[in-house]
Image (spheres, coloured by chain):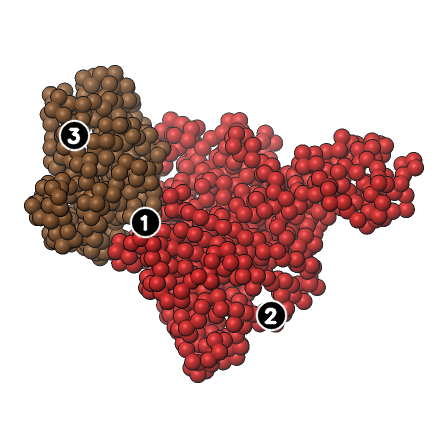
C-alpha cells in the first residue's frame, strides 16, 4: 500500500511549467532564432493575384543589388521529386499537394512565387519588395456562396475523416414532430494566427548535412517530407523544434518556409533562414468558411424526434480537405432518426487546415445553437432539454462510452453559474441600462491516442532523462511528461529532464488532436517502467536486498526509494542501486500503442458544458461576455494548472469566434483583406472578464493506461454557441452568422 | 522596406532645413505608423528626420489660459498630464481610447495628427487605392467597406481618419502650430485635415516641408460635461467604427454651448457646427439630442457594408450627449476606458 505522504507523486499536482524560466528569460529558442554561422536570409514574394500564370520574373535588377545571392522561382528551381506522393505529408488530405515554385501557375492569392536570398534580412526584404513579376490573370472563384448547389461528398483521403452515417427516417420524423425548427448557420474563414511567425533556420554543415530548425507541430512529419522531396537520407536532414509560440493546427503540415529554406540551402550550399510575415501567415491554411443547415423536431415529451444536419465547406482546387462537421450531431444526443450530410466545394484558395477542434468547433456551434432554438420552440429550459435527450450510448458507433460524465458537467457547471435562477423568457434580465442574458451549450471531442515511443535513461547520479520526438505548443508537454516520469520512478522533479522535438529521438505523432498527453504520456510511463524493471533486477542483486523475490508489481518507486508495497519500511535507496550496479546508466526504449480491443468495444470521448453571461447594450449593439463557466470531463487531469491554462485560452478563443474573429475576403480580388493582427481581431485583455474552469472527476479505465483524454480542443467547444444563446436570451434576437458584430444586433 | 538615410537634429530650425535635397523626406517621431507603412511598401521615404531630440516634448500653459501640447510629447504623457486630466478630460479620454499602452508610450502628439487611414486597400499593394497610388481606383468602393466613411467621401476615396485624439481636438477647437524653413503659421483644427475630393493622397493641408511643433488648446475645456464614446469590434486596440466626442456647457438643463465631433465616419474628424447650433439654447433632452443626431447624419451615405454606421452614429451621438449631460465621466472613469 502506498503511503499518501509520498512527495514524488506528481501526477494530478500543479507544478509550474518546467520550461517557464527559459521562456521568460529568452533562453528558449524558437525556430527563427537559432544562431548558426554564415547565415543568409530568404524573403518570400507572394502573389497579388488569386489565379493565373506567371509570365515573366524580372530578376536581373534585383540580382544586381549588392548582397543579393539568388532569386529562386519556378524558372530556376531544379525540379525535385516528380510524384505527388513525395510531397504528401503524414496528415495531408487527398489530392495533389501544393509544390512551392513548381511551375508558372498561380492557384491562390498570396501563393509564394519567388524567394529572394541575400546576405542580410534587410537587403533580402528590400530586394523582394522591388522584384517585378508579370502575371496573366484568370477568372477566379473564392466565394463558397457561389457553390451552394455545387458541393460534393469528399473522398476519404484525409486521415481521421469519417463519412457521416444516417439512421432512421429523419424527414418523416420531423414532419410528424410536435415542434420543429430549421435554420442556416454560417461562419466565415478563420486563420490560426499563432503569435510566432512561421520560420525555418537551416544549418548547412560542411559535410552537406542539414540541421533544420522549423516551426512545426511534427518534426518527423517535416523530416519525412524533406527527405522525400529532396532525396535526402534521414541522417542528412535532422529536424528540431523545441518550442512553439502557439500553432493550433497550423503546424500539423509542413509549411512552405520549410521547402523554401531547405531548397535554398541545398542550392546555395549555405545556411538559410526564411521567416514568413504576418501577412503571409494568411496563406498557410485556415478554418474553412462553412454553411450549415440544422433541422430538428421534438416529440410532446421533449425528446428529439428527428435531426438533420448538413454542412458545406470550402477546399482548394488541388486538395480535398475535409473535416468531421456533422458527425457530432449523430452522437451528442439520443435520437433514432438522424440524417447527416457533409459536402465540400473547391475554390481558388489555399487548402484549409485543421484548426483547434476542426469540424467540431464548426459543427457543434451550429448544433448547440439549434438545440437552444429547439428548446425554446418546445418551451423547455436548455439544460432540461439536453438532459431529456441525454445519450447513454454512442448511437453512431453503436457502442457504450468508455466513460461519460457530461451529466455531471451540466450539474456542476449550472450550479457554479447559478443557472437555476435563470428565467426562461428572453429579455427578462437587466443590469443598469443593459440587457443580461444567460446561455449554455456543450461539446464532445474524440479521446484519441496514437502510437508513440520514448526513451528513458537514468545515470549513476540519479538523474533521469526522457526523450520523445513530440512537440510543445505551449500546452505543457514538457511539464506533464516530467511529472509522469518523476512519479513513475519516484524521483524529485528536479532530477528529471524531458526532451522533445528532435528527429533523432524516438518516434512521436504530430502534436495535435489533443492526443499528446495520452500518447506520449503513455510511452513515457512505459519507458520509465522498463527502466524500473531493470533497476529492480539490479536491486535484487544487492547484498541482503529486502527486495529479493519481489516482482515489479510488488514494489513501488517513491521518494528515491524502491520499497515493498506491503512493507514500505523494506526499501533500498535508488542511487545505491545505481552505484552498486556499476552501470554508468540504465536505459530503456518503449513504444506505446493504443489498445485496439478497447477501441473496438468503447466509444471514447471527452465532454463539456459551457455557461455564459453576456451584457448587451441594445441601443449600441455592444456585447460584453461577463462570465463563462466551462465544466469539462476529460478523464484524469495530469496537471490542473497547465490544463486550466489550455481551457482559459480556448474560452478566450470561443469569445473571439462568437464576437469578433473572421478573415474577410474581397472576392473581386480573391484576397483576404484583413491580413494583419490590427484588423484580424482576437480578444484583448479588456474583452475578457471572469472565466471559471471546472474539471469534473472522471475515471476511465479503458481510454489509455493513464486515463487521460486531452483538453485543448474540447475547451473551445460550446463557448461560441453558449455566448450566442446568451445573446438571444438577453435580446430575443438570434444571430446565426458569426461573428456577432455590432451591426448584426442593431 | 526601401533604403533610407536618417538624421536626428536637435533644433526645430535644423529639422525643417533637413528636408532640403531629398526626393522623399519624411519626419519620424514615435514611428508607430510610418514604420508599418514602410514595411508594407506603402510609403517609400528616402530620408527620415528623427524628431525625438527636439525640445518639443513639453506641455505648458499659454498666456491666454490655454494649454500648449508639444508635438513630440507622447500620447501617454499627454493623456496622463494633470492639467489635461483636470481641464481637458475629453482629450485624455479620447487618447486612452486609442491604440494600446505600448503604442501610446511611443506615439507623439504631432504624429497622431499625421497617422494615415487604416483602410485595408491602402495597406495592401496588391489592390487599387487612390490614396496610395493616385488614379489606380478605390478598392473599398464595392469592396469590403464595413469600416469606411459615410460622410464627406468622394468617388475617389471612402477612407476614414483613424485617430481618437483628433476627434477630441476637433471638438475642443485646438490650433495646430507648424513651421517650415520659410516660416511659421497656425492652422485651425477643422482646417488641418481635409476631405478626399479628387486628391485623396492628401490627408491634410500641410505644405511640403512643414513640421508640426505644437497643438494649442484654448482655455475652454468642457471639463464638467463631456464624453468620448468609442464603438468598435473589441474593447481595446481597435479603430472606431463610430466615435463621438461630445462636450456641453449647461445652465440648469439648458445647453449654453455645445461641441460635437465624430470619428470613424469621414476622411477627417467630423465636426458639425450646424448640429451644435441645434443644441445651443435647447433643453438637454433626448429629443434635442436626437434632432442634432439626425442633422449630423442628414447627408450620410452608406457604401453597403457600412450602412449600419448611419443609425449607429445617431445612437452614439445621443448616448454621448446624454453621458455628457449627466457628467458621468469623471477622472476615475477614464481608467476604465470609454466604452458604454
Please state if A298 lies on the left or on the right of A498 as rendered.
left
Residue B217: which disc?
3
**Quarter-of-image position of residue B222:** top left
Tag 2 and tag 3 share a subunit: no
Tag 1 and tag 3 share a subunit: yes
Which of discs 2 and 3 lies nearer the camera? The answer is: 3
Which chain is mark 1 on? B
Q: Is mark 3 on a helix, strand or loop?
A: strand
Residue at point 36%, 29% (across, down): A65
Which chain is mark 3 on? B
Residue A355 image position (x, y, % from top left): 48, 53
Q: Is residue A353 above or below residue B215?
A: below
Q: Mark 2 points at which residue?
A: A393
**Quarter-of-image position of residue A533:** top right
Residue B233: which disc?
1
Residue at point 42%, 74% (across, down): A378
Residue at point 41%, 78% (across, down): A179
Residue at point 52%, 71% (across, down): A389
Nearer to the camera, B191 or B201:
B191
- Chain whose colour in the figure is brown: B
Which of discs 1 and 3 lies nearer the camera? The answer is: 3
Amino acid at each position: 500500500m502506498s503511503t499518501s505522504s509520498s512527495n514524488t507523486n506528481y501526477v494530478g499536482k500543479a507544478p509550474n511549467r518546467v520550461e517557464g524560466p527559459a521562456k521568460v528569460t529568452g533562453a528558449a529558442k524558437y525556430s527563427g532564432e537559432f544562431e548558426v554561422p554564415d547565415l543568409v536570409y530568404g524573403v518570400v514574394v507572394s502573389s497579388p493575384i488569386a489565379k493565373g500564370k506567371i509570365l515573366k520574373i524580372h530578376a536581373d535588377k534585383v540580382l544586381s543589388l549588392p548582397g543579393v545571392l539568388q532569386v529562386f522561382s519556378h524558372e530556376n528551381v531544379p525540379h525535385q521529386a516528380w510524384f505527388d506522393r513525395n510531397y504528401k505529408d503524414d496528415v495531408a488530405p487527398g489530392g495533389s499537394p501544393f509544390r512551392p515554385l513548381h511551375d508558372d501557375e498561380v492557384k491562390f492569392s498570396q501563393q509564394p512565387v519567388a524567394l529572394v536570398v541575400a546576405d542580410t534580412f534587410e537587403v533580402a526584404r528590400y530586394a523582394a519588395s522591388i522584384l517585378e513579376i508579370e502575371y496573366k490573370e484568370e477568372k477566379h472563384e473564392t466565394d463558397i456562396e457561389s457553390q451552394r448547389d455545387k458541393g460534393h461528398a469528399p473522398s476519404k483521403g484525409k486521415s481521421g475523416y469519417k463519412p457521416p452515417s444516417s439512421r432512421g427516417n429523419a424527414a418523416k420524423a420531423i414532419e410528424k414532430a410536435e415542434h420543429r425548427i430549421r435554420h442556416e448557420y454560417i461562419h466565415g474563414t478563420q486563420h490560426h494566427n499563432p503569435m510566432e511567425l512561421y520560420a525555418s533556420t537551416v544549418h548547412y554543415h560542411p559535410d552537406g548535412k542539414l540541421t533544420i530548425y522549423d516551426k512545426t507541430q511534427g518534426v518527423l512529419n517535416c523530416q519525412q517530407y524533406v527527405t522525400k522531396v529532396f532525396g535526402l537520407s534521414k541522417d542528412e536532414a535532422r529536424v528540431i523544434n523545441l518550442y512553439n509560440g502557439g500553432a493550433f493546427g497550423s503546424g500539423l503540415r509542413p509549411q512552405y518556409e520549410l521547402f523554401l529554406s531547405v531548397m535554398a540551402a541545398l542550392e546555395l550550399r549555405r545556411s538559410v533562414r526564411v521567416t514568413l510575415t504576418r501577412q503571409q501567415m494568411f496563406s498557410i491554411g485556415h478554418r474553412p468558411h462553412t454553411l450549415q443547415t440544422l433541422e430538428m423536431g421534438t416529440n410532446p415529451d421533449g425528446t428529439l424526434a428527428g435531426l438533420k444536419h448538413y454542412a458545406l465547406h470550402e477546399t482548394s482546387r488541388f486538395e480535398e480537405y475535409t473535416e468531421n462537421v456533422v458527425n457530432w450531431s449523430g452522437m451528442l444526443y439520443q435520437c433514432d432518426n438522424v440524417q447527416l450530410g457533409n459536402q465540400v466545394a473547391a475554390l481558388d484558395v489555399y487548402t484549409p487546415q485543421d484548426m483547434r477542434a476542426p469540424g467540431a468547433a464548426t459543427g457543434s456551434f451550429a448544433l448547440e445553437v439549434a438545440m437552444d432554438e429547439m428548446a425554446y420552440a418546445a418551451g423547455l429550459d436548455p439544460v432540461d432539454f439536453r438532459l431529456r435527450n441525454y445519450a447513454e450510448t454512442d448511437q453512431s458507433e453503436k457502442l457504450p462510452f468508455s466513460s461519460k460524465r457530461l451529466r455531471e458537467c451540466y450539474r456542476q457547471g449550472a450550479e457554479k453559474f447559478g443557472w437555476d435562477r435563470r428565467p426562461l423568457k428572453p429579455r427578462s434580465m437587466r443590469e443598469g441600462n443593459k440587457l443580461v442574458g444567460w446561455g449554455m451549450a456543450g461539446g464532445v471531442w474524440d479521446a484519441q491516442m496514437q502510437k508513440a515511443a520514448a526513451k528513458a535513461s537514468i545515470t549513476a547520479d540519479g538523474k533521469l532523462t526522457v526523450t520523445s520526438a513530440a512537440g510543445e505548443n505551449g500546452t505543457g508537454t514538457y511539464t506533464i511528461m516530467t511529472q509522469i516520469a518523476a512519479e513513475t520512478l519516484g524521483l524529485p522533479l528536479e532530477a528529471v529532464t524531458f526532451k522533445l522535438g528532435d528527429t533523432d529521438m524516438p518516434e512521436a505523432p504530430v502534436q495535435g488532436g489533443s492526443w499528446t498527453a495520452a500518447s506520449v504520456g503513455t510511452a513515457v510511463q512505459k519507458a520509465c517502467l522498463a527502466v524500473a524493471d531493470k533497476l529492480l533486477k539490479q536491486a535484487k542483486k544487492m547484498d541482503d536486498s529486502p527486495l529479493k523475490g519481489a516482482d515489479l508489481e510488488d514494489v513501488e518507486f517513491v521518494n528515491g526509494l524502491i520499497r515493498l508495497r506491503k512493507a514500505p519500511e523494506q526499501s533500498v535507496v535508488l542511487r545505491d542501486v545505481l552505484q552498486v550496479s556499476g552501470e554508468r546508466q540504465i536505459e530503456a526504449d518503449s513504444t506505446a500503442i493504443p489498445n485496439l480491443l478497447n477501441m473496438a468495444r468503447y466509444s471514447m470521448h471527452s465532454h463539456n458544458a459551457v455557461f455564459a453571461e453576456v451584457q448587451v447594450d441594445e441601443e449600441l449593439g455592444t456585447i460584453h461576455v461577463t462570465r463563462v463557466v466551462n465544466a469539462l470531463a476529460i478523464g484524469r487531469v495530469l496537471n490542473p494548472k497547465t490544463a486550466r491554462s489550455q481551457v482559459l485560452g480556448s474560452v478566450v478563443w470561443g469569445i473571439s469566434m462568437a464576437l469578433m474573429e473572421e478573415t474577410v475576403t474581397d472576392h473581386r480580388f480573391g484576397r483576404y483583406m484583413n491580413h494583419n493582427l490590427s484588423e484580424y481581431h482576437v480578444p484583448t485583455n479588456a474583452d475578457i472578464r471572469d472565466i471559471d474552469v471546472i474539471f469534473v472527476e472522471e475515471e476511465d479505465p479503458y481510454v489509455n493506461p493513464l486515463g487521460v483524454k486531452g483538453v485543448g480542443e474540447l475547451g473551445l467547444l460550446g463557448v461560441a454557441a453558449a455566448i450566442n444563446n446568451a445573446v438571444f436570451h438577453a435580446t430575443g434576437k438570434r444571430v446565426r452568422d458569426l461573428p456577432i458584430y455590432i451591426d448584426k444586433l442593431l | 522596406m526601401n533604403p533610407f538615410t536618417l538624421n536626428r537634429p536637435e533644433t526645430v530650425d535644423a529639422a525643417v532645413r533637413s528636408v532640403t535635397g531629398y526626393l522623399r523626406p519624411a519626419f519620424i517621431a514615435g514611428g508607430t505608423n510610418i514604420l508599418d507603412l514602410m514595411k508594407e511598401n506603402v510609403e517609400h521615404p528616402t530620408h527620415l528626420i528623427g524628431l525625438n531630440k527636439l525640445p518639443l516634448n513639453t506641455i505648458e500653459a499659454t498666456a491666454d489660459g490655454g494649454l500648449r501640447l508639444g508635438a513630440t510629447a507622447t500620447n501617454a504623457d499627454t493623456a496622463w498630464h494633470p492639467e489635461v486630466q483636470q481641464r481637458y478630460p475629453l482629450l485624455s479620454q479620447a487618447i486612452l481610447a486609442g491604440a494600446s499602452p505600448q503604442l501610446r508610450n511611443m506615439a507623439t502628439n504631432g504624429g497622431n495628427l499625421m497617422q494615415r487611414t487604416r483602410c485595408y486597400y491602402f495597406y495592401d499593394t496588391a489592390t487599387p487605392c487612390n490614396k496610395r497610388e493616385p488614379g489606380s481606383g478605390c478598392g473599398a468602393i464595392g469592396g469590403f467597406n464595413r469600416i469606411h466613411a459615410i460622410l464627406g467621401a468622394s468617388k475617389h476615396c471612402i477612407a476614414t481618419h483613424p485617430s481618437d485624439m483628433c476627434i477630441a481636438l476637433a471638438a475642443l477647437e485646438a490650433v495646430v502650430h507648424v513651421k517650415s524653413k520659410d516660416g511659421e503659421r497656425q492652422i485651425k483644427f477643422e482646417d488641418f485635415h481635409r476631405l478626399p475630393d479628387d486628391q485623396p493622397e492628401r490627408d491634410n493641408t500641410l505644405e511640403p516641408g512643414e513640421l508640426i511643433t505644437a497643438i494649442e488648446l484654448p482655455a475652454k475645456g468642457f471639463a464638467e460635461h463631456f464624453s468620448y464614446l468609442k464603438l468598435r469590434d473589441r474593447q481595446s486596440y481597435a479603430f472606431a467604427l463610430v466615435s463621438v466626442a461630445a462636450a456641453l456647457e449647461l445652465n440648469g438643463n439648458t445647453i449654453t454651448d455645445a461641441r460635437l465631433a465624430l470619428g470613424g465616419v469621414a476622411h477627417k474628424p467630423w465636426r458639425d457646427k450646424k448640429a451644435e447650433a441645434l443644441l445651443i439654447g435647447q433643453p438637454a433632452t433626448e429629443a434635442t439630442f436626437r434632432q442634432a443626431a439626425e442633422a449630423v447624419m442628414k447627408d450620410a451615405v452608406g457604401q453597403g457594408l457600412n450602412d449600419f454606421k448611419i443609425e449607429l452614429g445617431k445612437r452614439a451621438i445621443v448616448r454621448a450627449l446624454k453621458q455628457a449631460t449627466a457628467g458621468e465621466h469623471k477622472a476615475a472613469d477614464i481608467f476604465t476606458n470609454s466604452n458604454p
